[in-house]
Image (spheres, helix red, strand yellow):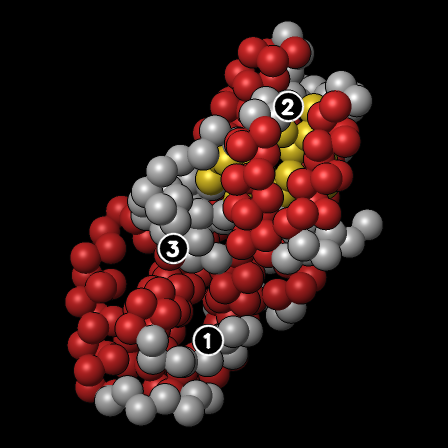
Amino acid sequence: MEYLNEDILFNTVSMLSDSGRIVLVVEGVDDRHALESHVSDCVDVICGTGGKVQLLNASMLVDERRLRRVKFLVDRDYDSTGSSNGKDEYSVLRSTNHDVFMDLLESNDRVFRRVVSAHNRGRISTRDEGVLESILSEAISAAMPVGMLRKISVSNDWGLNLSDFPFGKMKGSLDGGASCVVDIALGRSNSPIERELAVNLLSAAMDECGSEIRSMVSDHDFFSALSLVLDERGFRKVSSRSLSDSFFAAIDCDSLSGAAWFRELNLWCMEIAEVSCFGCPCEVAA
């Protein structure tokens, strides 16, 4: 079903809530796919089609009506404050990292090891922890400058085109850092920003990022960067789409249970209905 605007989405969750259902609203079909097989029978997982803005607008209506049986799980994106207005709504939970998938990756990297080794059978074993850890680290490091530049561009209204970033153009230049990413972005954008200024600001932001690196990395950038890293290291060439499909198919109970919002959603359901939001460990556990 398509929820054309926040009013239709609100009416839908209101109807489900009034009928006694518990409703978890997520941003997109990937999030719904990752969660719906793990939730309890009394929980409905639905997704909006208008993105984060639609969900947040609908959440304000939910809070006004005090519909306590509805929660919205949204990506934090690049918002370090938690909410757009600095005030957390009762009905909204945000990912700890950039998005829900990056939370799942951080909570348990066993799925990552399993998927990467499956795509490189005979070349990488799930027991090659050192190799797999370095691949993961390199992919995150390659994706981080793109996310950081995206945040800077939006904050400064630069108008850089960073959607579907072509990580393949970084082949042979993974160590290029800020300069490489800025050059690629400027080459596909109609932006008046000066290269030197962009490189300097991005370099400074990257230096300040520290341990918050994963908060800058989106799942789409991560999969594209991972595809490039595997290719650069001489492993089997795997498309970002194939990698993402494999990851979402392999998500298990251990991945979910390590996320902060998993625990918060379970506590919420226990508070309002004396049941767990998730059935983990459940039948779909890998």
Q: How many marks on residues?
A: 3
| Residue 38 relative to residue 94: left or right | right
Mark 3 Cα-neighbour bin, 10 Å: few <14, some 14–19, many ≥20? some
Residue placed most toward the observer, 64 or 220 = 64
Residue 179 lies, with reference to residue 88, above or below; the image says below
* Res. 12 mark: none
- Badge 3 marks a residue whose secondary structure is loop
Work out whether residue 11 can be spotted: yes
Residue 262 occupies which quadrant of the picture? top right
Q: Report the mark closest to the observer, 2 or 1.
A: 2
Residue placed most toward the observer, 171 or 180 = 180
Q: Residue furthest right?
A: 1
Q: Which residue is mark 1?
A: 162
Residue at horizontal 36%, vertical 89%?
191
User: Along the polypeptide, which appears first: circle 3 or circle 1?
Assistant: 3
User: Along the polypeptide, which appears first: circle 2 or circle 1?
Assistant: 2
The residue type indicated by label 2 comes to Arg
Residue at horizontal 44%, vertical 60%?
139
The residue type indicated by label 1 comes to Leu
| Residue 177 relative to residue 187: left or right | left
